[in-house]
Amino acid sequence: MLTGLYLSSVTQPKDNTSQTQRPNVILYLPPGPLFSQYPSLAYTQNLTPQHGLASTTLSTVVTVNYRLGSVGKEEKPEEHQEEAIQHETPSVEYFKYPTPIHDTLAGFDWILQTLQPAHLSVLGTHTGGSLALMLALTEAQTVRAVAALEPICDWTGLDEYCTISADGSQSSSPSNGSATTKKKAKRVQPSVRPDLVPLLEARERYFHTAERYFDAFASPLLFLRSAGKDVPKAFPRYLTGPEYPVPVLRSRSMDDIGGMDIHISDDEPEDGSISTSASDPETDPVENSKGTVVRRRKALSRWPPYGLDYGLSGANSPYRAIGRLEMTLPWVRLFVRDETPESSQHNHSNGAGNRKPGNQTVLARQAEEMVNVMRRACFWGREKGYGERKVTLARDSAGGKDAAMWLRDVVETD
């Protein structure tokens, strides 16, 4: 048990022969309560994910069970049992963001101060993958490599996969008071993405307000580009269920949604989704005061933020040598679940498979965008191809074992 952390553990490899040397450490961030039906790391029944990861990588594995959702309270020692009975507090607590971020950063600091690793890598799945990417972009000077399995990269972008009507049509109201006419664009049925509804439900459960999931520490893609929309005043609500294979917006009130990208334009994508990010990931449709759909650019941000690599006062300042920060992104690989084993051999390193966008999950689409944006934003001035080598996307059909072997190879090549 780690002091000050919630139910965390340290797992040593069996053949740990370098007791006198600084260890290689992997921070393991479990998937959390979302998609708990999928195994995070698929090893044998007698081998926990932590022990499998430690034996594969020959590294010390530190697990931080960050608090999110319903979490049982720790039992008090016997001398405090009477005090606990007197106060009679519930045995289960419910945690929302930013608690997982705080727990992860606390565990990260504990590793640096206590274990002082030679190399520190991070592996996380789903919510843990999101936290792992957060560490890649905020602790780049310390982290050697990051493997993220189906991470949640952008909570703000979930609305882009929803629609405003069950048939994908949109009515247009003329401003001259004439009768309302309906325009229906020719399009195929909106794509059904099996992970969309669980993600929408989780977003409302795990964030106190909509503003919380616009925080880049929760949606790491926002470290590198803007959300392309305003923060809504309330959570968007959708009709779901068997009769709504694609979630349908309950209300179109701008007061409720704050200009979010849930208004379909006449030139919307053919798959019927709201967002134009599938064809142009830098723009989102928003509606102005006149009711016309306009485009708002998702502005790319330079990483690290401009100026940090030139000192505190800029390149032309007489004090330019002060505080100069040399920083490069860690090795990063995002893994998406491969439901068709035959495609796992195709374009393993760059993720540019032959699948149509409509057949992908939301997490797969977000992973592709995250890789693309990281390559564009994080390697200014580098030679061509450097970003493609540092940040990659892979199809995983081995239950996370590919991620463990990739981390082992990255550490061994140093």
Image: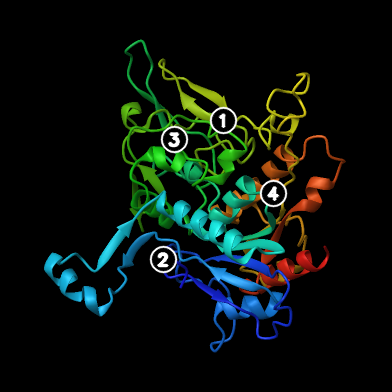
Seen as rendered, the residue at the extreme top is 176
First of labels 3, 1 by sequence position: 3
Q: From the viewer's side, name the closer residue of 239 and 143.
A: 143
Seen as rendered, the residue at the extreme bottom is 46
Name the residue carrying label 1. Answer: 267
Measuring 67% from the left and 41% from the top, which residue is drawn there?
373
Q: Secondary structure at mark 3?
A: loop
First of labels 3, 2 by sequence position: 2
Q: From the viewer's side, name the closer residue of 81 and 263.
A: 81
Name the residue carrying label 4. Answer: 141
Left or right, 362 with reference to 72: right
Measuring 52% from the left and 22% from the top, which residue is drawn there?
294
Q: From the viewer's side, name the closer residue of 145 and 285.
A: 145
Q: Secondary structure at mark 1?
A: loop
The image shows a total of numbered marks equal to 4
Left or right, 167 with reference to 368: left
